[in-house]
Image (spheres, rainbow, N blue to C red):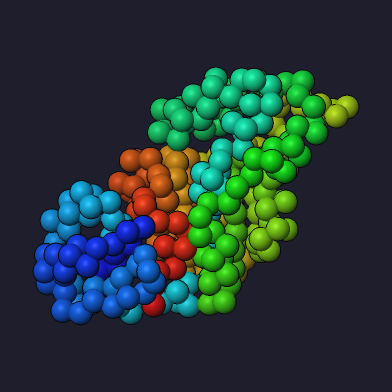
Amino acid sequence: MNLIIQGLEIENSDLRALAKLAGANHIERITGEAFRLKNATQREHVAQYCADAGLDYAFVEPSALLADFRLVAMDMDSTLLAIESIDEIADMRGIKPQVAEITQRTMRGEIVFEESLRQRTALLHGLEEEALQQVYDSRVRLSPGAEKMLQRMKSAGLKTMVISGGFTFFTERIKTKLDFDYAAANTLEIVDGKLTGRVLGKIVGAEGKAEVLRKISGELGLRREQIIAIGDGANDLKMMGEAGVSIAYHAKRIVQDNATYAINHVGLDGVVNLFG
């Protein structure tokens, strides 16, 4: 196995200690924030050492290549983006704390996503439509490494998709900006230039995200092993379950416990460093 070590600051002493723990016989630099320890053996003490040192780790088969995959699907809020868009919309009405509290409970799996979205959207009733553009223009920030990751994946031949429990107002703009192949999200009802507090159609929640991924992968004729899925919240778990490789990105504990790999310290470009 290869043991991939990533971190914002990696000491040579940490690499040597981890190589010894895992029985690796060669240390190879991938980037300044990522190293590959070759011919390693999976050992439990590696996880604790990395947790104490603030490092990300992953045991990956040497034969796993980025070009072996054909599709990457990712969540938008707090994954592709470094914000929760609905929380920022709520801030335009001065109710961000109330909405953010519901958001956090949802991401931990304490509230069913569909009901949570209805509750949060209802609080936005009467907000001017132009507030959405203000949020996009002034609040939207990509997570670190997002563009680098997407560029590498496209170069390797992967299709890209963003699947969000948020709103199409943002996913469609992000799709255009970053040249995603596919995008799916929920549609806000807007009447006379104001939000009604309702969502149109079937809500894209936990099962909805999985359905979208199954649909697109079916159209592309892909096997599960050819898909990477990235998310951070409990409502991403079913989508991530449809992929051969699932990655918990700066995620809630329930997501980390159920993902193939977890990235907690570096940016999204850490995803491509896992594979040859």
Residue at x-position 45% and y-position 41%: 233
The N terminus, quarter of image: bottom left
Identify which residue, 143 or 211, lies in the foreground: 143
Residue 202 percent coordinates (x, y): 65, 37
Quadrant of the rendered image containing residue 245? bottom left
The C terminus, quarter of image: bottom left
Residue 76 percent coordinates (x, y): 57, 48
Q: How many marks do you count on the picture? A: 0
Please give left or right for residue 136 compared with residue 87 in the image: right
Up the image or down, 96 lies above or below 32; here it is above
Residue 132 percent coordinates (x, y): 74, 36
Identify which residue, 222 or 100, lies in the foreground: 100
Quadrant of the rendered image containing residue 193? top right
Quadrant of the rendered image containing residue 182? bottom right
Kindly tell me whether residue 135 is visible in this rendering: yes
Residue at x-position 69% and y-position 26%: 92
Residue at x-position 37% and y-position 69%: 32
Residue at x-position 73% and y-position 58%: 176
Please give left or right for residue 77 compared with residue 253 in the image: right
Up the image or down, 76 lies above or below 109; here it is below
Residue 88 percent coordinates (x, y): 62, 33
Kindly tell me whether residue 158 is visible in this rendering: no
